[in-house]
Image (cartoon, rainbow, N blue to C red):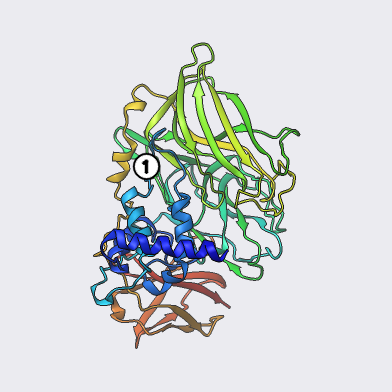
Amino acid sequence: MVLQRSLFFVLLTFASICNGQTSTFNDVAPILYKNCTNCHRSGGGAPFSMLSYNSISPWTTSMVHALQHGEMPPWGADTSYMHFINERPISQSDKTALLNWIYDGALEGNPALLPPAPIYPLYQLKGVPDTIIQMTLFKSNASYDDAYNTLVVPLNLGQIRYIRALELVPSDPSLIHHTVITADTLGQIAIDTSGSALSISGDIGIGTWAPGSMPIVYPNDPNLKIGIELPANGEIAMNIHTPKGTSGQWIDIKIRLYLYPENEVGIRPVYDFVPLQYWSNNFQIQAGQVKTFSVEEDTPQQPISIFSAFPHSHQICTEILNYAYQPQTNDTIPLIKIDRWDFEHQEYYYFKNLVKIPPSYKFHADHTYDNTSLNHHNPFNPPQLITVGFSTDNEMLFDGFQYIDYQIGDELINIDSILKSDPLINYLSVEESRPQYVTTSLVMPNPVDQKATINFYPPLVNQESHILRLFNLRGEQIQIDYDHLNGAIEISRSNISSGVYFYEVVTDKDVRIVSGRIVFS
C-alpha cells in the first residue's frame, strides 16, 4: 500500500512537470460550471457543490475516480449509437483539464480572478403555470430501508385537458431518489403511505423525476403539437422512492403544470408504455457471475413515432441495449445503447428526431448484470444471489418509451430545434441573477386568525419588487391582501377559509426566492 501511494504521487508530480504550468480553480471553474453545477449546487440534489473552491476541494479524489471511470457527468447513452436532446458527455479536453488541475495539487488561485458563476433560478420553466399541484406533506418513513409511498391529489380540471409541460419542484431534492408521476380518473389510485407501495398505479403515465432531471416539455409547433391527455374528472399521483436514512424529514413536492388552452385543436396524444419487461423465475444472477438477459416484444399494430426512451434496471446492471428490428429482413432501428448504466442517474432520453417504428417490427432489449466484487455498485460485499424484484437490492429489466401515432413525415421533424426555441425553457447565462440574500422565512403567528407577518432572515431588500402568492391544497391561487413593511410582508386574512395553504414570494421577474406553509384557523 505504501509503495502504491508513493507511485501515485510520483505520477502526479510527473504529470505536473509535463503539463508545463500549474492550473488553478480559476482555470477549471468554467468547465465545472458547464458540465457539473446543474446538479452540484445548493438544491441540485448532488452531495456537494462545485460552485466554490472550498466546497469542491475535499472531493477531488472522488472526482478522479468518477472522471476516469466515465461516471461523471452522469450521461450513459452512447452518442455514437443514437443522438438525444440535451446530451452532456464531457469532452476529452475538459476531462484532461480537470484531471491535470487535480494532479497539480488542486490549487485555488486568486479568488478575485474567479470567473462569475452561473445563477440557477428555482424554476427551470418560465411563465406562470396553469396550476401548481401541492402534494400532501408527509414525513419520510425510510429508516433502515428505502421507502415507496403513493400520494394522490384531485385535478378538478372540468374538461379534458392536455399537458404542455411540467416541472417538479421538491423543497429538498436529496430526500427523493426518484418519483413516478401518473394520472387516472378520480378514485382509481389508492393513497399508500405504508412505505411499501412498490407497484405503480394509474393508467396514464406522465413521467419520472430524479434529482438533476430536466422538466418535461412537449413540442408545441405548427409541425408538431403533442401532449398527455388528462381526464376532466381525474387525479394525479406520485409514487415516491425515498432513500433509507431520511426517516422523520418532511417531504414537500410541488408540480408546476402547464396545460394547452381549453379546446385547443390539433394536439396529438402522447402514450407511455413499457413493452420490454422480464419477470421470469430464471432471472437470477449468482454471486461472482456476469450475465446477460434478453427480451423481445411485438410493436403496436399501427406505425408509431417514438419521442423518448426510459430504460430501467437496478444496481448491478452495467449495460443496456434497445433496438427494433424486422424478423424477415433483419433491418434494425437503433434506439438506445448505455455502456455504463448507473442506477443513481435515470432519466428520459429524448430523441433529436422522432423515430418511426413500423408495425411488423419487434422491440429487443439486452441487459448485462455484473454480480462480482469488481462492480463497486454491487449492494452486497461479498456478492450474493440477486433475483428479480421491486426492491433496490433486487434487479429488474423494465424499458419503456413515449410515442405518438405515426403520421407521414414524422421522422423528418427536428425535435431538438423546436425545443431550443421554446419560450417556456429557461436557458441560463452567467449574467442572469436572482436575489441570493433570502435563506428562510417565518410566519408569525401561525396558525393565523386575522393578521400575520411573514418575516425574512435577513430582511427583504427592494421589498416592493417582491410579490406574494397563496395557493390552496389543490394548487389554485387564492387572492390575499398584503403590504410590505420594513423588509417583511404583513398579510390580512379577509375572506380566506380555514385550512392549510402554501405561499411563495417571487421577484417581479417571476423568480421564487422562498416558500412556506400557512394555516388559517
Q: Secondary structure at mark 1?
A: loop
Nearer to us in this view, 521 or 131: 131
Q: From the top left corner, tell me how far across and down residue 89 is, in percent.
A: 38, 47
Tag 1: residue type? Ile
What residue lies at 32% left-to-right and 55% top-to-bottom? Answer: 426
374 sits left or right of 130 in the view: right
Q: From the top left corner, tell me how far across and down residue 469 is, in percent.
A: 41, 69
> Which residue in the rendered view is the most extreme toward the front?
3
Nearer to us in this view, 160 or 281: 281
Nearer to us in this view, 427 or 225: 427
Q: From the top left corner, tell me how far across and down residue 160 is, in percent.
A: 48, 41
What residue lies at 40% left-to-right and 62% top-to-bottom? Answer: 12
Q: From the top left corner, tell me how far across and down residue 355 is, in percent.
A: 41, 28
Image quarter of the N terminus: bottom right
Nearer to us in this view, 429 or 287: 287
Question: Label 1: which residue?
Answer: 85
358 sits left or right of 143 in the view: left
Seen in the picture, residue 244 relative to 350 is either above or below; the reply is: below
> Which residue in the rendered view is the most extreme toward the top?
328
What residue lies at 29% left-to-right and 34% top-to-bottom? Answer: 222
Seen in the picture, residue 466 relative to 195 is either above or below; the reply is: below
